Amino acid sequence: MNLSPNRRTFQASMIAASLGSGLLPKSSEAGTDAFALNYLLGSCMYGYLYVGEIFPEVRKTGSSAIDIWPKVHGNQREQLDGLGEEKFAEMLKAHDIALGCITQYKLGPFGLQNEMKLASRFGCSTMVTGGRGPKGLKGQELKKEVGKFVEAMKPHLQVAAETGVSIAIENHGSNLIQSPDSLKWLAEMGPDHLGIALAPYHLPQEPELLADLIRALGPSIKVFYAWQHGMGCMTRLPKEQELLQMPGKGTLDFAPLLAALKEINYQGWTEIFMHPVPRGIPIHETAAEVTREINAARDYLETQLRGG
């Protein structure tokens, strides 16, 4: 498709705005001896709040970019459509942040082609979705299905390569890719532009097992969710129990996980995360309270990263 000069200029300006926001992981900027996490803020932590109220919070959480979610978890992806790409890009630039990731479970891994083209126009290099396929498999049967999934993804990965996007598959419950073995096989078989969004919540809450898995997956990890199971996120709980999903609140010791991320010189995003019940509400009533909760988790992670 031939683009008009104005359209080409618009696309280039959006990419420039994104790349000009200092998005290189801090470990890359300062060398591996100064390893640091590269934080990404999930829009759904603020429920359906207007992006104009969320964007000012991004830098306050130590993040350089935002991960936008569609309904039902958030509606910031729909807000992008409502505002238009040019206005959305202007708002990002005004707050010196970038669109770092688009999460799209409802489109699934085989429905992202147009979304990847949109991501490319923003200089957004990461997209998260689930890995669809048979559930509850083990052993060679599981390995075979992971291979089939990778093969089926190849036409979509061609578009990913053309747009500069990596598709990160989360180990989501009730999906083909959910167990440690399925993740290892995906990392082993997956070609360029197919990676992993690692969610400890959906895995055994065993620090050393999770740390070993991080070492095994290595550069295949594109997004690390700082998220633990706590008391779960499927039924309504008192707020103090719901918040046990957050780092530092529940019982999972993140120190071994962070040590493993440092050992592999992890270059991807770290997203402090939890799910509220019902989906679509913010984790606290106000944006300031949400940001404060995220920063409490970030303080915990940074303390553990420095050795407690």
Image (tube, rainbow, N blue to C red):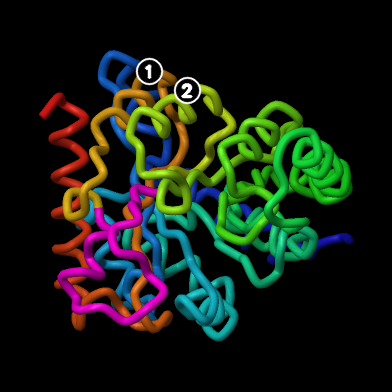
Reading the image, the residue beneath label 2 is 215
**Residue 97 covered by magenta stretch:** no
Quote the CA–CA distance across marks 2 and 1.
8 Å
Mark closest to the chain's N terminus, 2 or 1? 2
| Mark number displayed over residue 239 | none
Reading the image, the residue beneath label 1 is 263
List x then y, in percent, for residue 246.
25, 56
Q: Residue at x 21, y 48 (%)?
A: 251
Left or right: 14 in relation to 225: right
Badge 2 marks a residue whose secondary structure is helix
Q: Residue at x 28, y 58 (%)?
A: 230
Q: Are marks 2 and 1 in contact (CB under 8 Å)?
A: yes
In the foreground, 152 or 238: 238
Q: Residue at x 81, y 44 (%)?
A: 145
Residues rendered magenta in the picture: 225-246
Q: Residue at x 55, y 72 (%)?
A: 86
